[in-house]
């Protein structure tokens, strides 16, 4: 099986930068996803990493270190609408099915 | 932008009743999935479907569950005899055929079993 850990909750100030960490233990790593989920809504895709390094997409960046089993999602210039749960999900082995972590609830305050 | 759609958005049913949740995946996608999310818990994989058959399923997907693609556009999840613990949000997702293709989720059906 896979073990995915992320903090339960984080708070940050509007306009600031926040980093949400995700660690995982798995065999046959095959990609890591970050999704955003607002309360009562579906997860929406943010980023995909399969090789080490940083992927930047606008205000959001995602980093992966396969040797450390570690990823982070970096959110810059935080806006109130960024308040949501951020889900780390890992694919492993020959499966295309991602296993989701419990998510990190981010609260952005003025 | 193409999107996954699901109906109904909400469903209330009595324990023991059958329910069918419907999904229309993105039109050129070939892989289809059902997930569920019990309130306050993580997203859990149920089943994946490709080429008109189940390709993977989780321990949750027992004999009370079935999936079907009855025509070229719909993808359904049937729960034969609902239990209280089936109350959850059910998400359909689809993806294209490339290795790095991600899954796109529908808006979900909130199922409440009384």
Image (spheres, rainbow, N blue to C red):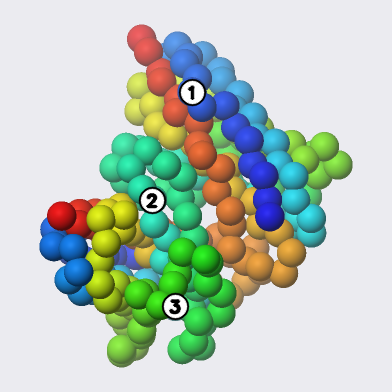
In this view of the protein, which residue sits in the foreground, B82 or A32? B82
Task: Compute the Cα span from label 1 to label 3.
Answer: 37 Å
Q: Residues within 10 Å of mark 2 (few under 14, many from 20)?
A: some
Task: Compute the Cα span from label 2 to label 3.
Answer: 26 Å
Which residue matches tag 1?
A9
* Chain identifier of the residue bearing label 1 in the image: A
Which mark's residue is nearer the viewer, 2 or 3? 2
**Which quadrant of the figure has residue B66?**
bottom left
Disc ID at residue B28: 3
* Chain identifier of the residue bearing label 2 in the image: B
Would you place residue B60 above or below residue B65 in this image? above
Q: Secondary structure at mark 1?
A: strand
Which residue matches tag 2?
B37
**Residue B108 shows up from this direction:** no
User: In the shown orientation, is residue A47 left or right of residue B108?
Assistant: right
Q: Residue at x 47, y 16 (%)?
A: A11
Q: Secondary structure at mark 3?
A: loop
First in sequence: mark 2 vs mark 3 = 3
Percent x, y of residue A54: 72, 38
Which mark's residue is nearer the viewer, 1 or 3? 1
């Amino acid at each position: 099986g896979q073990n995915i850990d992320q903090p339960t909750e984080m708070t940050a100030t509007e306009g600031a930068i926040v980093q949400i960490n995700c660690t995982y233990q798995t065999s046959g790593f095959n990609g890591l996803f970050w999704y955003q989920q607002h309360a009562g809504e579906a997860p929406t895709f943010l980023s995909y990493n399969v090789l080490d390094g940083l992927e930047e997409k606008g205000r959001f960046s995602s980093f992966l270190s396969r040797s450390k089993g570690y990823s982070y999602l970096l959110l810059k210039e935080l806006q109130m609408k960024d308040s949501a749960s951020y889900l780390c999900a890992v694919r492993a082995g020959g499966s295309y099915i991602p296993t989701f972590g419990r998510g990190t609830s981010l609260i952005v305050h003025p | 932008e193409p999107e996954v759609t699901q109906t109904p958005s909400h469903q209330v049913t009595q324990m023991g009743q059958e329910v069918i949740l419907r999904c229309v995946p993105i039109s050129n996608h070939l892989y289809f999935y059902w997930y569920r999310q019990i309130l306050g818990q993580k997203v859990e994989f149920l089943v994946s479907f490709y080429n008109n058959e189940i390709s993977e399923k989780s321990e949750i997907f027992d004999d009370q569950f079935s999936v079907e693609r009855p025509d070229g556009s719909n993808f359904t999840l049937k729960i034969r005899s609902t239990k209280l613990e089936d109350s959850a949000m059910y998400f359909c997702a689809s993806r294209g055929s490339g290795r790095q293709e991600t899954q796109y989720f529908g808006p979900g059906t909130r199922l409440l079993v009384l």
